Amino acid sequence: MPSSPPPLPAAPVPSPAPGPLPRHGAPGRGPLGRIDAVVHLGFAVLLVASAVRYVMRHSPADNLWVLALAVAVCSLYAVIAVLSQRRRPWAVWMFVLVALWAVLVIAAPSFAWCSFALFFLCRTAFSGWVAYLAGGATAAATAVGLFRLSGGSDIAMLLGPLAVGVMLTLIYDRIEQDAAEQRHLHAEVSLAQGRLAASERRAGTIEERERVSREIHDTVTQGLASSLLLLEAANRSWPAEAAREDVLTASGMLRRNLADTRSLVHELASPGLDTAPLPEALLQAASQYVPGVRLLVTGEPRPVPADVRHALLRVVQSAAANTKLHAGAANATVTLGFLPGAVTLDVYDDGAGFDPHSLAPPSDAGGYGLRAMRQRVEQLGGVFSVESTPGEGTIVAAQLPTGEEK
């Protein structure tokens, strides 16, 4: 004899994750995570509660075959759960489970509560029209069972499960669409990050090439150019005593260039200039090209960061080499100033001067010096400027922050 119908459960709010099990043994594809354990536990609790309810409301003769069918359904569900955890094909078994479940729920509507877990299991096992068919079969079997339980008199028992199944399907589809969109966006972000990393690597390579180019220009190139001028002058006046002095000076400059080249190969540092006090190191660097250069220091001398020190040395070397090669100056002065939180450098000569706005672009013939100096200073957050007028000398000025509190 049929028992009184249980109240139809309201449509539950679906879990954030769409399915309890990974489809066809693949990793869980739920958009917000896997809920395998929750669905399995819920199915077990509802199955036991439904079985107890059925036993209490029916005679022992009716209980045997229904309980045997319930045990078969429970066993098959357990087999599917184990296969899914072991990444073995299990979707085929779902057809058998849905068929047995349909028989059970029609014969014993008390087990209708378990339909929710079975619905999510069907949507996880199948995709496309097969998923809709399996979910629809579960809802239809539940509707028929409850309608039969009401004696065919309660239309709500027939339409309720169908309406709940439609709502769950729509909600589930929306969650899957959002998950697919999230995966697509994640893939686009990953692709963009990969492109950004590649771009940064290319930019780093270009920056490193420019840095090495500046180092070579400010040391080897300038020294070789100055040595060449000295040797050419010596050749013109040979065998005068001045020629011998030019040759000796050129030899010393070439030796320093050789030391600079070896240093560039190793650590791109200036030998003999890293340990001396900054004013002394700047004077030594400028004297390589302009022997009579003067040094003025303003403010209280103090140590500066290594990168700032290196930039100041290279600016002085490049500016002094330009003075030697192009200015024809009688006097040159290097002024080093220590300010709160910054250090300044001015290299002045009274030579021929030039128009800074009419310089030719860099080429094989030269033109890299001012560009290299500006890049050095600005990369460290400093300010670089050149003031010059034809016939009135040149001032190369730089100001670099030292990172100290002002």
Image (tube, helix red, strand yellow):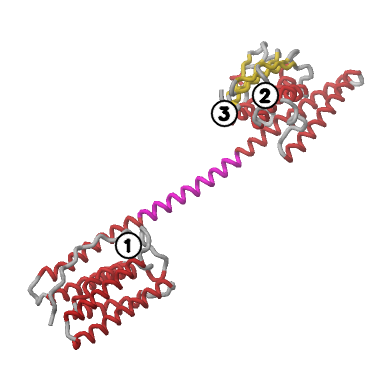
Q: Amino acid at mark 2?
A: Arg
Please tell me whether residue 38 is drawn above or below residue 404 in the rendered image. below
Under circle 1, the secondary element is loop
The answer to whether residue 197 is above or below residue 321 is: below
Horizontally, residue 257 falls left or right of residue 347, namely right
> Badge 3 is on which residue?
381
Residue 118 visible, this angle: yes
**Amino acid of disc 3:** Gly
- Determine whether label 2 and label 3 are within 8 Å by CB: no
Please tell me how crowded label 2 is: few (under 14), some (14-19), or many (20+) other residues with Cα within 10 Å.
few
Mark pair 3, 1: CA separation = 53 Å
Report crowding for label 3: few under 14, some 14 to 19, many 20 or more residues within 10 A (C-alpha).
Answer: few
Whether residue 185 appears in magenta in the rendering, the answer is yes
Quarter of the image with the N terminus is: bottom left
Quadrant of residue 33 within the rendered picture: bottom left
Question: Residue 11's x, y, as percent?
Answer: 21, 63
Callout 2–callout 1 Cβ contact below 8 Å: no
Q: Residue at x 73, y 15 (%)?
A: 332
Point out the frontmost of discs 2 and 3. 2
Q: Is residue 129 magenta?
A: no
Which quadrant is the C terminus positioned in? Answer: top right
The magenta stretch spans which residues?
181-206
Left or right of residue 296, residue 145 in this image:
left
The residue to which callout 1 is attached is: 18
Mark 1 or mark 3, which is nearer the start of the sequence?
Answer: 1
Q: Which residue, given by chain and number where applicable, does mark 2 sit on?
A: 302
Quadrant of residue 87 within the rendered picture: bottom left
Q: Given this view, does label 2 or label 1 mark the residue nearer the observer?
A: 2
